Image (cartoon, rainbow, N blue to C red):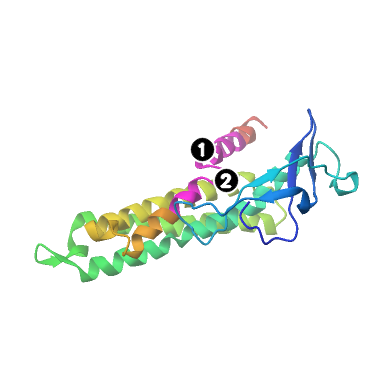
Amino acid sequence: MTTHLAQHQLLYAKRSSPDSKGLWEASDTHIMLQEMNMGQHCSDTRGIVFEDVRVPKENVLMAEGAGFKISVGAFDKTRPPVAAGAVGAKRAFNEATKHALERKTFGKPTVEHQAASFMLAEMAMKVGLARMAYQRAAWEVDAGRRNACCASIAKAFAGDVANQAATDTVQIFGGNGFNTECPVEKLMRDAKIYQIYEGTAHVQRMIASREHVGKLKA
């Protein structure tokens, strides 16, 4: 779980074959100590231990067997905001640009070296495209349209862009970028989770492919 301060906790449980979605009594569970993640340290991530937990019948939400369908549908709405967070890679882009303008190597600003300028150009293009991708996916939700494909594309692309931008920024900073006293080192650690949570980058590609092929077969 990502916070132990929540007053309500939601559980997706599988009972033999049908799955259920319900609320359980928090007193029946034990919250573990905060886990130390590689990045995004402000995220209070903890494990939950279940001991003889029973979900009261009145706490089951909707019908048994509907849990998986509900969770998948929820992802279509939650992936665009996660992609929006990944577009925060612009922070890395800004740091790289500022450093490349100020730092001089071989007698001229780093930005005047083609290798560095091309990395900045890649960041500019991809951060901008990632922003448009999540906005399109969010628009689909507002328009009441099914956005599974757009949401997965936005999430996968923005997550990849965040990681590439952070990695290239560290490269532009050189040895300083690898030091923990440099802010871009943190950005690189923070970026990785965007390829993992809310559905991995590989799962997003599977969904996008399935949706694309499904439209052609329809």
Front residue of 159/57: it is 57
Mark 2 residue type:
Ser
**Residue 19 on image: x %, y %:** 78, 36
Front residue of 1/30: it is 30
**Residue 120 on image: x %, y %:** 30, 59
Residue sitting at x 62%, y 47%: 47
The answer to if 54 sits in the magenta stretch is no
Residue sitting at x 44%, y 56%: 190
Front residue of 152/57: it is 57
Residue sitting at x 33%, y 66%: 95
Measured Cα–Cα span from mark 2 to mark 1: 10 Å
Marking on residue 202: 1
What kind of element bears circle 2? helix
Name of the residue lying farthest toward the left: 107
Mark 1 residue type:
His
Q: Earlier in the sequence, mark 2 or mark 1?
A: 2
Residue sitting at x 50%, y 42%: 201
